[in-house]
Structure formats: C-alpha cells, structure tokens
Amino acid sequence: MKANILLYIVFTTTFCFSQNTFPTNGNVGVGTLNPSKNLDIYGGNASTILKISNSAPALYSTEIHLGGDTDFNKSAIISAPNAAGWYRQDLYFCLANGNDLLSTGLSEAAMVIKSYTPTGFGYVGIGTTTPDERLTVKGRIHTQEVRVDMAGPLVPDYVFAEDYKLKSLKEVEDYIKENKHLPEIPSSQEIEKNGLKLAEMNMNLLKKVEELTLYIIEQQKRINEQTSEIKDLRKENQEIKGMLERISKLDSQLKK
C-alpha cells in the first residue's frame, strides 16, 4: 500500500511539474488559438487587452522597457518616474540612451503628457518637460499642411465693407516713419519677446493684402482717369495744331 502511494506521488509530481513552460521556438497566444507573433494578445471589442500593475499604493518607478535586457540596451521606456506619478498621472516617453526624440540626458523625458492641470485637461510636450499649451514642441516641425480653425468675425473681409475707413497712404507713411513697422503688425522686438501667433498674424497679413488691393484699385482708377485726360489733351493738341496750320496758310495767302 505504501509502495502504491509513493508511486502515485512520484507520477503526480512528474506530470504536474512545469506545466506552464513553452517551447523556445514558436508563438504564444492569449485569447487566440492562432498566434502570429511571439506574443499575440487578442482582447476583442472594447476589452482591456493588457494590464500591468503592482500591489504598492502608488506607482513608483513602474516602467515598460522595449529593447535589450540591460539598462544600457533599452530602446525605449514608458514609465512613471517616481511616486508623484500616481498623483500627477503623467505619462513619460523617454529613451535610455538619450539620443532620440530630442532627449538630452539619461533622466530627461523626451515626450511628456501631463494631466495634473487644474482644469483636468492635459498638456503635451515634445522635447520639453514644461509644456505650456495643449501641444508644446521645442524644436522644428516638418509637415505638409497645417489647418487652423477660425471664427468668422476674425476673418478681415470687413475691409471690403462700404463703411470701412481705409487709411490714406499718407497716414500709413507717417506711421511707418514713426514706428518702423506696419500698423497692426507687431514689431520685431515684440515677436522676439512674445513669439508669433500664426493664426493672428495670418489674419493681419490678409487684412493688409485686402487693404493693399483697395489701394491698387484706387490707384488704377486714377491711372484710368489720367489716361483719359491725356487722350483728351492729345486730341485738343491735334486740333490746335490743325488750326495753327490753317492760320499759317491764310497768312501766307494774305501776304501774296
């Protein structure tokens, strides 16, 4: 009897040991019977696909590492940098080698998404850890197109209204002489200090183009009037020239 019990324990231990091991070559599937990658997780519609947590009361240095198996071989890190991350709910994307995403040091986040503002809305910073707008980028941006939504009244089509008071060119000239820049356009000192608001500047430039169009139209009207006057003067000169020729002929006949 004892021999049978001992034999049962040996067989049970043998079959139950390491039942969660996987082959070294092959794919692992969670929620799917046909994994296509080394780890293929399928959660279905509106499901939590992957959750990583710990038992501590706050996220302290919790990280997801993508890359090598040592600190110096990590390609990318998604982390909560310290205990304050639990309360601030920041999400830091940074690189351990400090070479990409405009990162300048091992401990500096290259992209930060903050959500601890009083309004509850987050600011996104790329290349900076102190974003002051919904998206703050420290560096250059390369894109094919930028679309800015504008409210109707901000578009300066009112320049073409009948009651719009267009400054005279003399007034514009006097303003430029005194201020060294166009009216309603910030000076170089203001731009260097406060930056340039593209939407506002584009509307101001559009306004200047529309005003310039009105000046050109007015100048063209004057040119047309002057051209008509010149034609009339030429016609009068021809008539006067003809009269002088006839007078000269009459004078010659009288002298004979």
Image (cartoon, grey):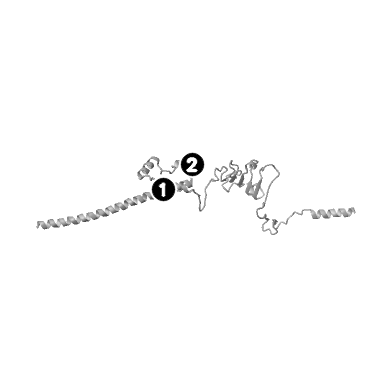
Q: Which-is-in-front pick, marks 1 and 2?
A: 1
Q: Nearer the viewer, residue 23 or 212?
A: 212
The answer to whether 213 appears left or right of 92 in the picture is left
The disc label shown at residue 142, or none: none
- Name which quarter of the figure residue 231 lies in: bottom left
Q: Which residue type does callout 1 highlight?
A: Val
Disc 1 or 2, which lies upstream in sequence?
1
Where residue 166 appears, as percent x and y from the top left, is: 38, 46
Q: Which residue is mark 1?
A: 159
- Residue 20's place in the image compared with 60, above or below, is below
Q: Is residue 217 above or below residue 180?
A: below
- Quadrant in the rendering for residue 108: top right
Q: Residue furthest left?
A: 256
Secondary structure found at label 1? helix
Picture residue at 35% right of the left edge, 50% below the top = 218
* Residue 109 appears in the picture as rendered: no
| Secondary structure of the residue carrying numbered label 2 | helix
Residue marked by disc 2: 194
Quadrant the N terminus occupies: bottom right
Q: Residue at x 31, y 53 (%)?
A: 224
**Residue 103 shown left or right of residue 225 in the figure:** right
108 or 97: nearer the viewer: 108
